[in-house]
Amino acid sequence: MKLILFILTVLMLVGCQSPFTPEGKVTMPTAILPVAPTLTAQPTAPPTVTPTFPPPTLVPSTANPDRYEQARRLGRGVNLGNALEAPVEGEWGMVIQEEYFALIHEAGFDTVRVPIRWSAHAHTDAPYTIDATFFERVDWVIDQALSHELNVVINMHHYDELFDEPSQHQTRFIKIWEAIAERYKNTPTQLYFELLNEPHGNLTQNKWERLMSETVLAIRRIDNTHTIIVGGADWGGIQGLLNLKLPEGENNIICTFHLYDPMLFTHQGAGWVSEAYGTLGVVWPGPPEVKITPIPEAEQVNWVYTWFSQYNAFPYETNPAGPKPIRTTFDWAERMRERLDCPLWLGEFGAYEKADMQSRINWTSFVREQAEALDIPWAYWEFGAGFGIYNREDEGWNEELLRALIPE
């Protein structure tokens, strides 16, 4: 009898081992991932196809949803930017209004992405409680979206402290997501969780992959139903997906990337980027009818000086403000979708208001067509601020820009 009790005790201890190493890393089988392919030829222009995306429904799912169906459901979207990701809503001039949701739905959009600066509304000490009033504000936004038959993506935006000091903020990051998952675990699957917007800085790819895996595991202990969206490091561009390793065994995840190429066009004159982006009058597509002389601050940056030299001289097909960089991005996106076996979502793309309107229309339409030709759902940046498709002062759409996104 003593021998039997000893054997049973050993079996119980083995069965209760923690999935974490002493360093806090999840111990999972290592997947053998193929090496990212070498791009040997420029992709040809894909056909202009407008896919039919299924409309969102409001029926909660009792089973783990299909991630490819969840991605297709996102369809055509728009970011409600400059509101809840500001330090305080309204500080950047944008406050989300109830009528916006009806306008967005009636215009033909399927999804709203809601950037949220949770870190500004959670305690800095354990247990990192989220302010109740702010949580209620997010509740209202989610309810408005769902009641207007819109999918809604909530993310973690502008957690700048995490980018500066990842090791000191990783526990807080996970605990905030646990609170979010606990609050919304019973909402319909038209709500999506996007873990972190544009990881960068000291949150390197390796550190981000480890934090991502631990956060997904923490969420899944609470909520095994809602689809999780993740992007790569290096500001969330397509390059961040090239060597990304997804959490092993997670089958309800969507991969996202952002596209703002060329930045010297899409961000010309923006006040939050360096002075090298200050040259105005950059048109899309290039080359310009009259050569542009970059401002002195731009000429002092080697890559910017080279870019403008090519922009002024190269023909349309090879111009850095032409189709080539964008087609190359989508060619890589298609390869990454296959390598990762992960559906893709273009979570942000847009051109700032300092560019001329016709160029913004040209660029926006081209990017949207490339995405839809590959059945990649998207969300434009953004609704009603500097990149906006809606003029809040005039209470009307910028119709031509809207039609670049919703042609019909």
Image (cartoon, rainbow, N blue to C red):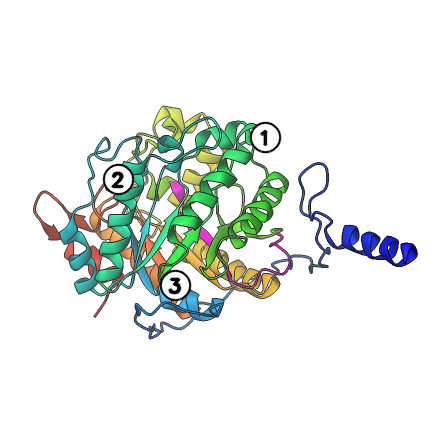
Which disc, if any, is residue 246?
A: none
Q: Which of the two marks, 2 or 3, is nearer to us in this view?
A: 3
Over which residues does the magenta segment extend?
A: 245-263
- Mark 2 or 1, which is nearer the eye? 1
Q: Verify CB contact (< 8 Å) between mark 2 and mark 3.
A: no
Tag 2: residue type? Ala
Q: According to the image, label 3 marks what residue?
A: 189
Q: Is 321 left, or right, of 58 in this rendering? A: right
248 magenta-colored: yes
- N-terminal of the two: label 1 or label 3? 1
- Name the foreground residue: 344 vs 148: 148
The answer to whether residue 181 is seen in the rendering is: yes
Q: How far, Cα to Cα, is label 2 from label 1?
A: 28 Å
- Under circle 1, the secondary element is helix
In the shown orientation, is residue 358 left or right of residue 121?
left
Name of the residue lying farthest toward the front: 1
How crowded pointer 1 is (Cα within 10 Å; few <14, some 14-19, many 20+) is rated as few
Categorize mark 3 by other alpha carbons within 10 Å: few (<14), some (14-19), many (20+). Answer: many
Front-most of residues 1 and 369: 1
Q: Secondary structure at mark 3?
A: loop
Q: CA distance from mark 1 to mark 3?
A: 32 Å
Amino acid residing under circle 3:
Thr
Q: Which residue is mark 2?
A: 83
The CA distance from mark 2 to mark 3 is: 24 Å
Which label lies toward us, 1 or 3?
A: 3
Instruction: Tell me the amino acid under the disc marked 1.
Output: Ser
